[in-house]
Amino acid sequence: MPLSLQNCTEIVKLDLSEKEFTGNSPVWIGERFSRIMILILQSNKFHSLLLKELCHLISLQILDLTDNNLFGNIPRCINNFNVMMRVSEMEQDIDNWSGADFYSANLEDAVLVNKGAMAEYNTILNFGRIIDLSKNNFFGEIHMEVVDFLALQSLILSHNSFTSRIPKNIGAMIFLESIDFSGNQLFDEIPQSISNLTFLSVFNLSNNRISGKIPLSTQLQGFNASCFTGVNLN
């Protein structure tokens, strides 16, 4: 990545997807971009740990690091992403900045993988709360801190090497529309609290070591069997 970017300290959106960037993910993203709300680095060749410096990005609402070579644990300090926790201010966040004209000129649109398909976001990006870390080499636990993201709409952690239980209180994240934990090494039962997620339209736990019954819920019972491939449902 060009070092000159670190001088753009007022940036609120950075989309560097599919640019063939290589090397370590730059530390200065967390140090210099304190106002950034949207960070999209998908489909590059970055490698290194998921930097704790990202925890400084307290206004971040969309984090898309999919399809790189990143590795390590998710740092517990991600619960510094304050915007992802607020459920009462979704329509007001945009007003904390420079106004609608600023957003129309600068946010334009971004393309993300959400709900299992490509989705376009434009000036309504203030409504989106997304974390996508899929297709990397992350491992370890899915920390309980993730459950603090009460306003999160998509949590995509598929095709990594996470080895833990799904957080029991995940049902507290009542705005979740997409959960994809497929292709990891998660174990134990599917938490009963998932039945509280009435907005779910994408749900994939396939190819893990999860066992137990699907929690009783009209919505969960309606998902295709492929979402549970490799799951022991006895």
Image (cartoon, grey):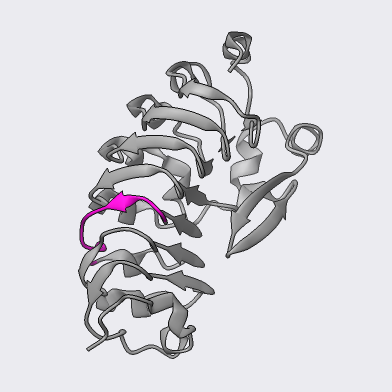
- Residue in the foreground of this view, choosing between 76 and 80: 76
Q: Main secondary structure of the magenta part?
A: loop
Does 229 sit left or right of 94 as displayed? left
153 relative to 3, above or below: below
What percent of the width, then of the height, locates residue 192? 26, 78
212 relative to 160, above or below: below
Q: Which quarter of the figure has residue 234?
A: bottom left
Q: Is residue 206 magenta?
A: no
The furthest residue to the left: 188
Q: Quadrant of the N terminus?
A: top right
Identify which residue is drawn at 75% across, 43% down. 109
12 relative to 176, above or below: above
124 relative to 185, above or below: above
Q: Which residues are magenta?
A: 159-168
Identify which residue is drawn at 57% across, 53% down. 90
The answer to whether any part of residue 91 appears in the image is no
Q: Is residue 166 magenta?
A: yes
Identify which residue is drawn at 69% across, 57% down. 119
What percent of the width, then of the height, locates residue 148? 33, 53
- Residue in the foreground of this view, choosing between 19 and 172: 19
Does 165 sit left or right of 153 as displayed? left
What percent of the width, then of the height, locates residue 217? 38, 88
Does 23 sit left or right of 231 as displayed? right
What percent of the width, then of the height, locates residue 45? 52, 31
